[in-house]
Amino acid sequence: MCGRYGFTDPDQLYDRFYVEEHLKDLKDNYNVAPTQEMPVVERHSPNSVHIRKWGFKPGWSTMFLINAQAEKLATSNTWSKAFRESRCIIPANYFFEWKRLSDGKQPYLIQLKNHKMFGFAGLILTYHDENKKEHKGFVIITTTPNKTMEKIHTRMPVILRKEDEDTWLNPDESETERLMKLLNPYSDEEMEAYPVSSLVNKPANNFPEITKPV
């Protein structure tokens, strides 16, 4: 799964994802957690960026869903419509995952070796709260792990290659087979992971120190 990530140096977002209109007061978030509101890139000719809540609450669930398995996108009643019609990209600089040990769990920070901003493949979904108010939330798509990630967890988020992002966002792109090919594990050779402090376990701990190796 993917349950935490980091979004730092927001100014990178606009050039990286070809977004012309800038958001006001966009700040670093070193420890993004589910239900928080974060920037999401969508296609509206040109690309646009919107603030959406991380998570989607379908009518049949009492919990927010934050991830969608790539293998189920085309066939699941929960995901198939969004997969066809409302794909998005979630900008990030790194993500956290927890490795299960005999005496507990060790958090790891995972990022690209070049330390540049990248984009998770995601979906935008509409749902209604108990007051019938409409909301738009996002989920991060996960896939099988590469060699770096399989030492830490059984799943990993889909990181899109830059050259594939335009195809992913294209609202007219309805070729399921072609889209599914974009959702493979990211190259192991281009990623790095290291253990970090358990301070990251609490979303309230949102400062640069939680990204330091231990």
Image (spheres, helix red, strand yellow):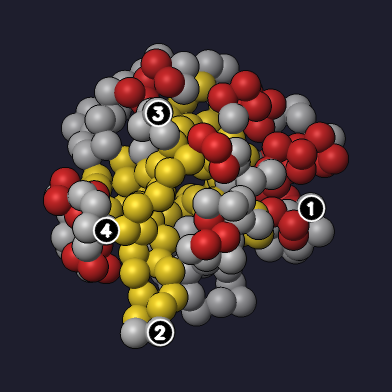
Q: Which of marks 3 and 2 is nearer the N terminus?
A: 2
Question: Do residues under tags 1 and 2 come within 8 Å of each other at their CB atoms?
Answer: no
| Relative depth, front residue between 181 and 76 | 181
Residue at the farthest bottom position = 103
Disc 1/disc 4 C-alpha distance (Å): 36 Å
Q: Earlier in the sequence, mark 1 or mark 2?
A: 1
Disc 1/disc 2 C-alpha distance (Å): 37 Å
Residue 9 position, x and y percent, is 25, 30
Mark 3 vs mark 1, foreground winner is 3
Q: Residue at x 36, y 58 (%)?
A: 108
Residue 15 visible: yes
Give the vertical position of 121 relative to 104 (above or below): above
Which of the image's four quarters has the C terminus? bottom left
| Relative depth, front residue between 208 and 176 | 208
Q: Badge 3 is on which residue?
A: 114
Give the vertical position of 68 relative to 189 (above or below): below
Disc 3/disc 1 C-alpha distance (Å): 33 Å
Type of the residue with mark 2: Ser
